[in-house]
Amino acid sequence: MTESMFKSAAATCWALLFFASAGAHGADNARLPDDAALHEEAAGAKPLKFTAGYYQYSSLAGQDVNLRYRSGDASFWFGAYHDREFGSQSRAGLEGAFKPVSNLGLSLQPSLQVASHGFVGGSLTAEIGEPWFVLAGWGRTNLKPYFNLNFDPNDAISLAFGRREENGRTFYLMAVADDRLHTGQKHLHFVSRLPMGHGERLTVDVLHKIGEGDAGPVNAWGASVAYDWKDWFVRLASDPRQNFSATNAMRLSVGTRF
């Protein structure tokens, strides 16, 4: 996909989305404990989710579009990202969840991701317990060029502890730490997901990050707030020193399920 084709496609998607969402609304995240199945079930189990993201950096802007298909506990997605410094990158992925021992309450969540510029990455997460749960995950990439949209280190281990109730109300603390590149980069997430009735949900994620960055040591706080309606969602995130660079980022994501 050429740069001009990507810009035209992204502009078209943005126009269609905002035209369709006048008076409607919509959140998307990755790498965190996945109670999405509960919400998708409450939202009518619509299999497709479209998300458009706008990123405002210190001196430029970026855009991405993403389409996800969910069937049961498996998801397939593809998307594209662009900014004038990094350029364009197409990407796709598979995610799943299964319980190898039904009466143990253990859930395994593998994922695989590929992107242009030769990037390949994957992760495996294990979660056990209810309503209190613990989670451990491990991710690896081939270290090819990749613009990280989830902001957490990709070559990392993840640990979480929290509580997920039957109505979907969830609280957890999660740490994501680089265990490969010796940067000392760590993210600590404090997350609350609160059902608001009528198939709606509020998610608040407070982030603290420390570690060695491109421009020296990083010690910063960020946050994201998301609101899900039955068919629409919106998410606003602030990420200082994004990906441990010198750049501060704001992200607005909006989308719909159908």
Image: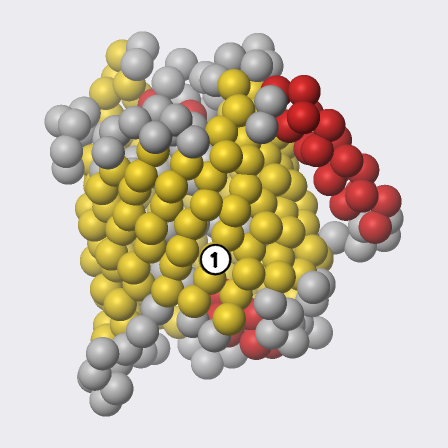
Relative placement, left or right, of 70 versus 246 is right
| Residue in view at x 67 percent, y 26 percent | 5
| Residue in view at x 31 percent, y 10 percent | 215
Q: Which residue is mark 1?
A: 76
Looking at the picture, tell me which residue is in the foreground, 222 or 111: 111
Q: Give the residue type that dot 1 points to.
A: Phe
Relative placement, left or right, of 38 versus 180 is right
Residue lying furthest front: 1
Quarter occupied by residue 69: bottom right
- Depicted 29 relative to depicted 156: above or below: below
Relative placement, left or right, of 17 versus 239 is right
- Depicted 229 relative to depicted 157: above or below: below
**Which quarter of the figure is the N terminus placed in?**
top right
Percent position of residue 52, x then y = 64, 41
Percent position of residue 108, x then y = 26, 67
Percent position of residue 77, x then y = 50, 52
Mark 1 lies on a secondary structure that is: strand
CA neighbours of label 1 inside 10 A, class few (<14), some (14 to 19), many (20+):
some
